[in-house]
């Protein structure tokens, strides 16, 4: 009677180890993420919209937000954009009890990198990608033609951003922050990146399902 439970434990353990092995030592995540990548040609634009991601500790942004910020900074320094909008309403915990949004934290870091404050804007009214875009387009004091904007996000996130922009009939260009990230070199990041890729597919499927309904 005791062998059967032990056999099940062994089989489950074997399956889990095989899945982890495939994620860590094969390019499965790279293959999965390729259909999600949209990286449209960049032309000079009045503004770049940078999608914020999450945070890992009080007042500390996670690397997905940082690589998007870096791409926006690159466009700004090359003179391809004149203004930057930091977009994202997720609140970060901090020690003072006055939490900032990730978009506000991105602006603060941009200032440290030498971006002029007059060239920076924060929009943090949404709590997910769809709400971020919708609230940005519906803001009462729109300063820009969003059809001319460059939208910067992580490569696995570009497909969904493009879909939402198309939904709102926005023709702005979507660019990938850092395509080389499709197969991170650090093991822990590979597992995390696989999880994010699967999460992105689930989000896209939910969009497709709601449209079909």
Image (cartoon, grey):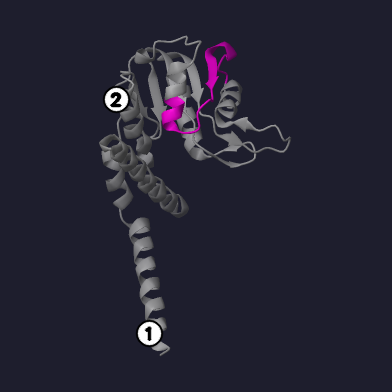
Please state the extent of the stretch shown in magenta in the rendering. 114-133
To which quarter of the image does residue 102 belong?
top right
To which quarter of the image does residue 200 belong?
top left
Q: Does residue 185 appear in the picture of this structure? A: no
Q: Can you identify the residue that label 1 sits on?
A: 4
Residue at left offset 39%, top offset 23%: 151
Q: Earlier in the sequence, mark 1 or mark 2?
A: 1
Q: Nearer the viewer, mark 1 or mark 2?
A: 1
Relative to residue 43, is residue 68 drawn left or right? right
Residue at left offset 46%, top offset 20%: 136
- In the rendered image of this protein, does residue 42 appear above or below residue 143? below
Residue at left offset 38%, top offset 20%: 150
- In the rendered image of this protein, does residue 128 appear above or below residue 190? above
- Secondary structure under tag 2 reads loop
Residue 133: x percent and y percent? 42, 24
Q: Does residue 165 appear in the picture of this structure? A: yes
Question: Which of the numbered marks, if any, corresponds to residue 40?
Answer: 2
Question: Could you tell me which quadrant the N terminus lies in?
Answer: bottom left
- Secondary structure under tag 1 reads helix
């Amino acid at each position: 009677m005791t062998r059967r439970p032990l056999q099940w434990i062994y089989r489950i353990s074997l399956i889990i180890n095989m899945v982890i092995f495939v994620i860590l030592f094969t390019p499965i995540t790279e293959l999965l993420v390729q259909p999600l990548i949209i990286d449209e040609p960049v032309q000079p634009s009045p503004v770049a919209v940078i999608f914020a991601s999450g945070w890992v500790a009080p007042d500390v942004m996670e690397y997905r937000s940082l690589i998007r910020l870096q791409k926006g900074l690159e466009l700004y320094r090359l003179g391809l954009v004149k203004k930057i909008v930091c977009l994202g309403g997720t609140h970060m915990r901090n020690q003072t009890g006055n939490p900032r949004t990730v978009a506000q934290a991105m602006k603060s870091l941009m200032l440290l990198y030498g971006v002029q404050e007059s060239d920076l804007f924060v929009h943090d009214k949404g709590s997910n990608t769809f709400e971020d875009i919708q609230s940005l387009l519906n803001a009462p004091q729109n300063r820009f033609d969003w059809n001319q904007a460059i939208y910067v996000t992580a490569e696995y996130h570009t497909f969904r951003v493009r879909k939402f922009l198309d939904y709102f009939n926005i023709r702005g260009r979507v660019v990938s922050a850092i395509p080389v990230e499709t197969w991170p070199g650090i093991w822990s990041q590979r597992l995390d990146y696989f999880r994010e890729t699967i999460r992105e597919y689930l989000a896209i499927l939910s969009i497709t399902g709601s449209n079909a309904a």
